Image (cartoon, grey):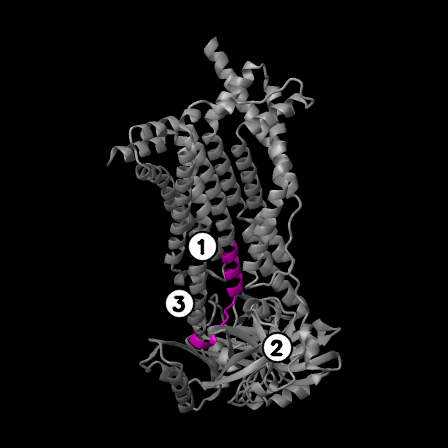
Amino acid sequence: MSTLVKAAFRSSLRNVAEFIAIVALIAFSLSLYITASVTYASTSNLFKNYLRESYGDVLVVGYIPKEMDNLASHLSWVKDYAGFAVVPGYGVTKSGKTYPLLLGYTDAAYRNNTLLGGFKAKPLKEGQALLLRQGSSFLHPGMHLTIYLAITVSGAPTPFNETIVGYAEGGLPLPAGPVVFLSPPDGRRLVNDFGGYTVYSFILKKELPENKVVPLVERIVKEVGGYIGFVYYTKKDLIYYPGQDVIAESSNALKYVSLVSWLVATVIIVIISIIYIEKNIKELGTLRVIGTTKGDLAKYLLVLWGLRIYLGLIAAIVVGYVVAIYAIHSVLSHPRLQPLLMFLHIVVPAKAVITLLGLSTATLILSVVISLAVLSRLRISEALTFYGLKLRIKEESSLPFSLMLAVSELRSVLWRSLATVLIVALTVSLLVLPFAIGDSLTSIHVAKGFDVKVTFLIIPRISPPLQTALSTLDFHKATSASLWLESLYGSVGMRSEIDVNGKIHNVYTYSCLMALKGSCWEAMPPLLKGHWPRGDHEIAISLLASKLFNLKVGDVITLYRHYRNKDFVDKVKVVGIYDETVYPPSIVIPRNLAPPINTLKVFVIRVTTQHPDALALDFQNTLISEGYAAVSMTWKAYAKELSNSLKFIATSVKNTIFNSFVVVALGSTAFALSDVSTRKKLLALFKAIGLTTKDYFVTTVTKWYVIAIVAIPLTTLMLISFADYGCYLLSKIYYIQQVKIPLWYLALIVIIPIAIGFVVAGYYRFAEYREELKTN
């Protein structure tokens, strides 16, 4: 190791407190980025794998005879399998009240070697049942029901006498509710009475192409005498999974706050590096006198700052990783999510580590380059004198003494005063930014698109034709009602992508199949521009899609449609933009681009009404009693679910205030420690002219008020800029139309001078006390 490098190491470690503060500053400013990256990479794969393991690689909805169990056990390409019996029926209470419902059972819920089934049921005795919480509506634990099947293959079976003993935290892989889930003895009887299953799942030993696996599954179902409604292939049809928007938005927000933290830390470190040059000018001047070249000085500074910055980087990765593990395990401690733990693989994305390495290197290069620039412009003869005492004090000044002294101190080292203004602006912006982003998220405007939304499924051999469902529903309480196709199950309904300037983007697709009462568009969000599709190749897009893909009315794009192993390509024109601002980005296509209605099995009815709760319950009950799998949702329930998601994201962003506070505290500490030698000499001067602790407190507060007043415009500009750009980045998931800036940041700027005044005055009094002890 060369003498120069050793000198750099010694200089770096000379002030241990300053060294630790800078390392910790880098660590905390970058750790949040690792936490966000690890959490997103680990949980996004986690949810995808969980859904695959829960519902299978291939899921068949229809009527599948129980003989499939024996056949599936001998298939070489099948790793695991499970059947789900979901059978329409009705339950009668002791008082004679009747409730339409679905009886459900799968033996997978009681097996420890599989997650198929979507949940784990607690051990039940014969006559006991669980209620699936999703779509439970009017049923509740404690109810005793005599349940009759609406459809069987073996005559009139004995009714089921069931007591609901609790909830099951899960749901079936189809729109269904309420579902009464049976014990193993009653469940096996249900399968025998019904003759088989309505849903069957396969987990494959290895991945197979869609054009091979779907026909293969269709063939074996027909071999056992089954009927197919549709085949769902997880790899292709799982476009949007539950929680995807929340995970992505939270991760993006945390990464952005971390990047702002890095910017603040970098500016502080660059300022400290300049102070270092001034504070150690004798040492650096000696190096220049003995013939040290600029290259050697650069190497010296690289070692000096590189040691601190890269140690901070290593600490950031470790801290971020540990926090991510704790956060993920805390979330998965919920009973409903505990099964996910068996699929948890903590992933540290290489891209995230490379990004942090690049940011750290940028900080190092900036510090060294600016230090060399300052060093080259500094005149050694002048620097060796203490310029900090050049106070311009004029007795005849009309200013109050404390203000005159404060202004003189600020002017004596002007660049440090300006640097302090910049640090105040950056640190206040960093502290307020999480609240600005969080408040902006929770204030997102969501235009109402329906009062009631009913999703129902036609189950082959069980459900009557579509026309029966439409004819039995009572629409007299509805203002409008329409039948829609939506991308609920990918290519089962229809999977779509759009090509915008050569980039392919997945989009959620709507198509109105028929108006049942009034107009299709009455149950959609309002139009902002243009009109709804009228021609054969016209589409409307959501506001989120418009902003995300930079599309406007009049643009012509390519639309790719996929349905049941068939692909279609069309040129379409954007003719309207509707007010939908939440994930996923969506489009509305005309009826002629939708699949033939007689080939579809999953439908959505969108309704506007003055009686949403009553109508939602009535429609769900009617459809279930007729033999369909159905679940309804009111706008109020949808808005509450969306609000909870936005609050969760906002809370996760606001919780970064601890990280921001630590970064601010460490940055301020490092800056103060670097500046301590100057302050000591100023304290000596102030003591010489007779300043008491009280006088110095007033002077210090006055100085910081001057800094705060000067910093207000810069703080406002920075905070608005940071918040605007952050909301722009987050609008890729939820379109934020208005940025909210908390006005209490002004109070924060006012409070800071008092706090610093107390600290500095306390330090002055401590210095006085030590001098008194030495004297005595």
> What is the span of residues highlighted in magenta in the rendered image?
235-253
Q: Quadrant of residue 146?
A: bottom right
Which mark is in front, 2 or 1?
2
Q: Amino acid at mark 1?
A: His
Q: Position of residue 702 (x, y in %)?
A: 63, 28
Q: Amino acid at mark 2?
A: Gly
Residue located beneath label 1 in the image: 329
Q: Residue furthest top?
A: 776
Which mark is in front, 3 or 2?
2
In three-dimensional space, the C-alpha distance between marks 3 and 2, rounded to whole angstroms, equals 56 Å
Question: Could you classify mark 1 by the number of other residues whose Cα lies within 10 Å: few (under 14), some (14-19), or many (20 or more)?
Answer: some
Q: Position of 187 compared to 410: left or right?
A: left
Is disc 2 in contact with disc 1, using a CB cutoff of under 8 Å? no
Dominant secondary structure of the magenta stretch? helix
Question: Could you classify mark 2 by the number of other residues whose Cα lies within 10 Å: few (under 14), some (14-19), or many (20 or more)?
Answer: few
In three-dimensional space, the C-alpha distance between marks 1 and 3, rounded to whole angstroms, equals 21 Å
Q: Position of residue 63 (x, y in %)?
A: 49, 86
Q: Position of residue 233 (x, y in %)?
A: 44, 78
Secondary element at image label 3: loop
Residue located beneath label 2 in the image: 554
- Quarter of the picture containing the N terminus is top left
For the residue pair 98 and 640, the one nearer the viewer reads as 640
Q: Amino acid at mark 3?
A: Asn
Please tell me whether residue 8 belongs to the stretch shown in magenta.
no
**Residue 229 drawn above or below residue 508:** below
Q: Is residue 759 visible?
A: no
Residue located beneath label 3 in the image: 112
Please tell me whether residue 248 belongs to the stretch shown in magenta.
yes
Question: Could you classify mark 3 by the number of other residues whose Cα lies within 10 Å: few (under 14), some (14-19), or many (20 or more)?
Answer: few
